[in-house]
Each structure stands twice: as structure tokens, then as C-alpha cells.
Image (tube, grey):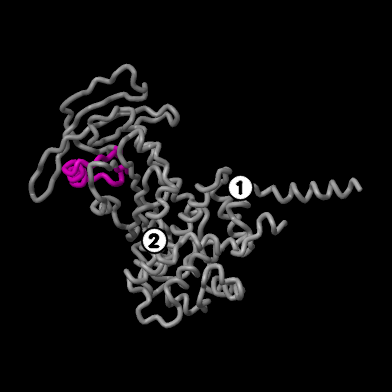
């Protein structure tokens, strides 16, 4: 490969790490006090080691420490001060505060929001649409409450549930909360911030009339599906304009009972029945958005599938089948580092004018992690050097 075209003084890994400003790491260290009583293996070294694990798709502590020992002389581009031994990395994953990695992720998300966002949805809806869902990651040990059914020998495996909020125009998680797999989804609704500029979209597993009343009081919109056993009273039937999408079958105003503090109050909601021609199914949605067109309610709920694709992207491209520790702290750290790597790859993808599949970018970075290639330059035109070399050979053959 021609060095004059693509050669870089930093490895691909160094260029990816350089997307994380040193000030972000320093700020997170001060805020979380994560280097308190630490002599050698500082928070920055820990972060870089775990990001290496995610980029290289390492499946064990021994694999991470062994691979990093081969980085002698290659750490200048990302300022790694201490290469950890297996026991050192294990202890750090067990004892260092998860809040350090959480703060780094949140600062990166704030920095690159304008890069990864797509404003088209907000331009149409005039509000911020946020998608809410959870995904369960199965564990081989019973670290958190069991998930699924027990095996024949009576033993149960553990599971951790990752609850996420994703802006519909960003496609990366901007709020993450962990719980045991047995925790009901609707408990997460209490953690959502309410304002009159937000619409939350979630599936019927989050149905909670108390939360719906809270949203309505703070003028926060929501869209979800109606449960099959829901009890309600129809108080008004809206006419469906002829110009609307023919998939809208019903548009009704309903009242549901909200029980709290030994009393029952009425909550007015809107129910929209919609026929999906593509899947040949009927759906019933409930919402507190009374002014939006009925077919737009169905369109908002359809956006929820984006969060399913994000979970699929995370599980397929990053090491979330094997964890580097058998404790809750280590698992949460690894998940946050996966989220950081997912964000960095998303930033690279957004900066490119050439279309690349996300999985292909992840594979490319893994293969060329310590090659000295100008990453963005190469990804824009990977065939350029080969074309130049072929032309040189053809010219020489003429003589």
C-alpha cells in the first residue's frame, strides 16, 4: 500500500481512541473519584483496555492481557501508561465505579449529538420522539435474578435487563438503566424525564396507568399498544377523515380507571385501531396525543422498531455473550464500554460520504486495529491505491 496516500502516524485504534478527548476522561475521573487509592492502573488505562476488548472482540481476561502485551511500542498514539495483567484487570472490573464509564459515555453522547442526529423526524413532529425498550442478556451464572425457565437439574441461569431510551433521530442509547431480568419493565417509566417537548414510544409491556397520568399532568406525550384485557369506557367516537390513510379503522376517546392511594380517578386517553397491510394485522394504540392525526399515531409506534435494531446491532457486533467477570460490576462496565464503542463507530459511519454497513465497519476496525492507516481517508476510497498500482504495472509493461 502506498504510504503517501494512506499512511498515518497513529494506528486505527489510536485514531478511534482520539475521538475521546482527554478532558472528558479527566472530568469523569474527578466527578466519580475513580482513581482514589489507585497507584498504577488508572481509570484511563482501564477504559482503553476495555475498549480494546470490545474492538478486538476478546472473550476472556487472559485474551485481553495477552493481546495487549504485544502492544509494546504501539501505545504512543493512545497514551496507555500501564498494560494490565489478568488479575489487575479482574480486580479493576470488580472494584472500579461503573459511574466513571457511564459519565464518559454521556459526555461523548453530548459531544457527538449533532454528528449522529437526523433532524427529519423532529422537523415533522415538532417534538423530540424518544423510544423506550429493554433487552435481556442471559448469563451463565445466577448473578442477578434468574431469567427463563429452570433446567432439568433445577439450576437457573442469571440475567441482566438493559433498559434504554433512544432518540428516534440518533439511534444510540442516551439513557441506560440496569435491573435483574425479573424486574417488570414499567418500573423504568419512573426514571423518564417529563416535559412538553417530548413523546415517548414503548410497547405494551410498559403499560402503567399511574405513569400515563403522570405524563399527562406534565404534558408529556406517549404512544403504546393497548393490552388485550384492558378495561375502559368509550366516551366519544371521532370521525375518520376520508383523506387519511385507509389503515385507520377506529379513532375513539376513552376513559380508564387509575388506582392510587386507596382512591380511583378517571384518565382520558385516545384509542386508535389500525390495520397494518404489510403484516396483515390489527393494532390498537393508546396515547394522550389528541391533536395529532390518527395515522401519525401508528407511524410513531412504527418508529419503535429502531430500538430493536439497535439491540440487535449491539448483540451481533460486540462481545456480549462472554463477560470478563462473574460479578454485576464487571458486567455493567463491559456493557458501557460496548456502548462507547458502538457510539464511536456510529460517529465514523456518519462522517463518511460512502455507504458502509455497520457490521463491515466493525470488522474492518478489528482486522486493521493496529495498522497505520488514515481511517476516514481509506474508508472513503479503499480501492484507490490498488487502482494506482495496477496503472503503474500497466505502464511498466509497455516498456
Q: Is residue 203 magenta?
A: yes
Residue drawn where x is 32% and y is 43% of the image: 202
The image shows residue 309 at horizontal and vertical percentages of 45, 46
The image shows residue 220 at horizontal and vertical percentages of 23, 42
Q: Is residue 332 visible?
A: no
Relative vertical location of residue 83 with respect to residue 289 in this rendering, above or below? below
The Cα atoms of the two marked residues, 2 and 1, are separated by: 41 Å
The image shows residue 88 at horizontal and vertical percentages of 47, 79
Q: Is residue 132 magenta?
A: no
The residue tagged 1 is 380
The image shows residue 232 at horizontal and vertical percentages of 18, 34
Q: In which quadrant is the N terminus drawn?
A: bottom right
User: Is 66 situated left or right of 276 in this image?
Assistant: right
Relative vertical location of residue 36 with respect to residue 194 in this rendering, above or below? below
Residue 159, which numbered label? 2
Residue drawn where x is 49% and y is 68% of the image: 48
User: Is 247 situated left or right of 340 in this image?
Assistant: left
Relative vertical location of residue 368 with respect to residue 259 in this rendering, above or below? below
Amino acid at each position: 500500500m502506498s504510504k503517501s496516500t494512506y499512511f498515518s502516524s497513529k494506528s486505527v485504534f489510536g485514531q478511534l481512541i482520539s475521538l475521546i478527548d482527554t478532558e472528558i476522561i479527566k472530568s469523569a475521573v474527578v466527578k466519580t473519584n475513580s482513581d482514589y487509592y489507585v497507584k498504577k492502573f488508572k481509570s484511563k488505562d482501564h477504559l482503553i483496555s476495555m475498549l480494546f476488548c470490545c474492538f478486538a472482540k476478546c472473550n476472556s481476561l487472559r485474551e485481553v492481557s495477552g493481546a495487549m502485551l504485544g502492544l509494546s511500542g504501539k501505545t504512543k498514539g493512545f497514551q496507555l501508561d500501564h498494560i494490565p495483567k489478568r488479575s489487575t484487570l479482574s480486580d479493576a472490573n470488580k472494584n472500579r465505579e461503573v459511574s466513571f464509564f457511564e459519565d464518559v459515555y454521556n459526555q461523548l453522547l453530548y459531544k457527538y449529538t449533532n454528528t449522529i442526529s437526523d433532524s427529519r423526524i423532529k422537523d415533522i413532529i415538532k417534538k423530540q420522539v424518544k423510544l423506550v425498550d429493554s433487552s435481556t442478556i442471559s448469563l451463565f451464572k445466577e448473578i442477578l435474578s434468574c431469567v427463563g425457565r429452570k433446567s432439568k437439574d433445577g439450576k437457573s441461569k442469571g440475567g441482566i435487563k438493559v433498559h434504554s431510551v433512544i432518540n428516534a433521530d440518533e439511534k444510540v442509547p442516551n439513557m441506560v438503566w440496569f435491573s435483574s431480568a425479573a424486574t417488570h419493565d414499567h418500573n423504568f417509566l419512573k426514571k423518564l424525564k417529563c416535559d412538553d417537548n417530548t413523546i415517548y414510544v414503548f410497547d405494551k409491556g410498559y403499560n402503567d396507568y399511574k405513569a400515563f397520568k403522570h405524563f399527562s399532568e406534565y404534558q408529556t406525550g406517549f404512544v403504546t399498544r393497548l393490552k388485550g384485557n384492558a378495561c375502559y369506557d368509550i366516551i366519544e367516537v371521532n370521525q375518520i377523515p376520508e383523506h387519511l390513510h385507509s389503515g385507520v379503522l377506529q379513532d375513539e376517546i376513552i376513559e380508564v380507571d387509575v388506582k392510587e392511594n386507596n382512591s380511583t380517578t378517571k384518565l382520558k386517553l385516545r384509542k386508535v385501531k389500525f390495520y397494518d397491510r404489510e403484516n396483515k394485522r390489527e393494532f390498537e394504540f393508546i396515547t394522550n396525543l389528541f391533536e395529532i392525526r390518527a395515522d401519525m399515531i401508528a407511524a410513531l409506534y412504527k418508529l419503535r422498531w429502531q430500538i430493536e435494531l439497535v439491540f440487535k446491532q449491539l448483540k451481533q457486533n460486540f462481545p456480549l455473550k462472554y463477560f470478563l467477570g462473574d460479578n454485576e460490576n464487571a458486567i455493567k462496565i463491559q456493557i458501557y464500554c460496548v456502548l462507547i464503542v458502538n457510539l464511536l463507530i456510529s460517529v465514523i459511519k456518519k462522517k463518511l460520504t460512502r455507504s458502509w454497513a455497520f457490521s463491515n465497519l466493525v470488522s474492518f476496525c478489528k482486522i486493521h486495529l493496529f495498522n497505520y492507516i488514515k481511517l476516514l481517508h481509506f474508508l472513503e476510497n479503499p480501492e484507490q491505491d490498488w487502482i494506482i498500482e495496477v496503472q503503474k504495472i500497466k505502464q511498466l509493461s509497455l516498456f
